[in-house]
Image (spheres, rainbow, N blue to C red):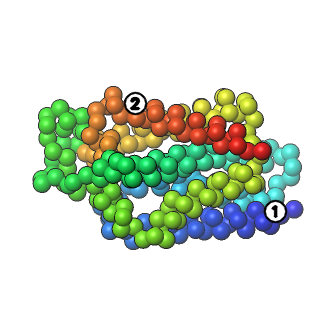
Amino acid sequence: MLRVGAFIFHTTAAAVMTWGWRSLNKLESHELVRKQRGGHLLYLTTQGLAIAWICMILSMIRDLRVFKFGSEFKFILDYINRVLLMIALPQTVSITVFYCLVTRFFPAALSSEAPAKANTSSDPEARADSGEETPLLSPPSAHSTEVARIPVLTDLALRLAPLLALLIDFFVFERRYTPGMVRIVAPIAIAVYGLGYIGLVELCARRNGVFPYPFLTKNRLGVRLLIYVAIARLVWDAFRLLNMMHV
């Protein structure tokens, strides 16, 4: 039987997120970011938006209940949806809190001045060792300097919509995760996602010459690894806290 309320909620949430994603091509920095390897998916905000959108679509399919209870496909669909939710929910919460704190107290960490001339080196490590300048008009600089110029509705669709959709989905329509899922599956899923993101940004940085965030570009590999680990731990702690709050 169709879960009408849940279906309407998931459909509406997915539609808002779709509009937010499509609105990216209206930003002044879109062409600059699009031309770089990795594009908008280098940014955790848009990654969270994409994963949240997938969660909403899978939830819509589950709401239709077209698969018989106990069927193998239903089990696989439910499991995939819940694993993605355990990644997307704490990631979105953590990044939103981190973004608000940094933009409030350390705005320089997300913004940078474009240098006077471009650099031909595509290796951030080599550039740091040689003392060369960062490339002209790097995508992070263009993106970060326009944060305040993002239209309010677009900003809400990119940041607030996924956050609220995932929180409501988890606390209203989903059951809390079992201790086994929290202790075993969650750290593995978050670690796999984290390693995938590290590989993506590190490889793309060698081609683009810069990282998606200035605080990554300004630091060497050892410091960046510490930042990655700290963020992954923050996501896992956020997941455990949210799961504890679920009744």
- Residue tagged 1: 3
Q: Which residue is drawn at 65% across and 43% down?
A: 242
Disc count in the image?
2
Q: Position of residue 109 (x, y in %)?
A: 32, 47
Marks 2 and 1, how far apart at CA: 44 Å
Q: Which residue is drawn at 70% across and 43% down?
A: 245
The answer to whether residue 182 shows anywhere in this view is yes
| Closer to us: 91 or 195 | 91
Q: Disc 2 on helix, strand or loop?
A: helix
Q: Position of residue 128 (x, y in %)?
A: 20, 36
Q: In this view, does 242 lie above or below 160?
A: above
| Closer to us: 232 or 62 | 232
- Looking at the rendered image, the quarter that the N terminus falls into is bottom right
Disc with the residue nearer the chain's start (2 vs 1)? 1
| Disc 2 to disc 1: CB gap under 8 Å | no
Q: Position of residue 106 (x, y in %)?
A: 34, 48
In-image side of 85 versus 180 (left or right): left
Q: In which quarter of the image is residue 2?
A: bottom right
Residue 120 tag number: none
Q: Is residue 115 above or below residue 184?
A: below
Q: Which residue is drawn at 34% across and 31% down?
A: 223
Q: Position of residue 28 (x, y in %)?
A: 32, 68
Q: Disc 1 on helix, strand or loop?
A: loop
Q: In which quarter of the image is residue 31?
A: bottom left
- Looking at the rendered image, the quarter that the C terminus falls into is top right
Dot 1 amino acid type: Arg
- Residue tagged 2: 226
Dot 2 amino acid type: Leu
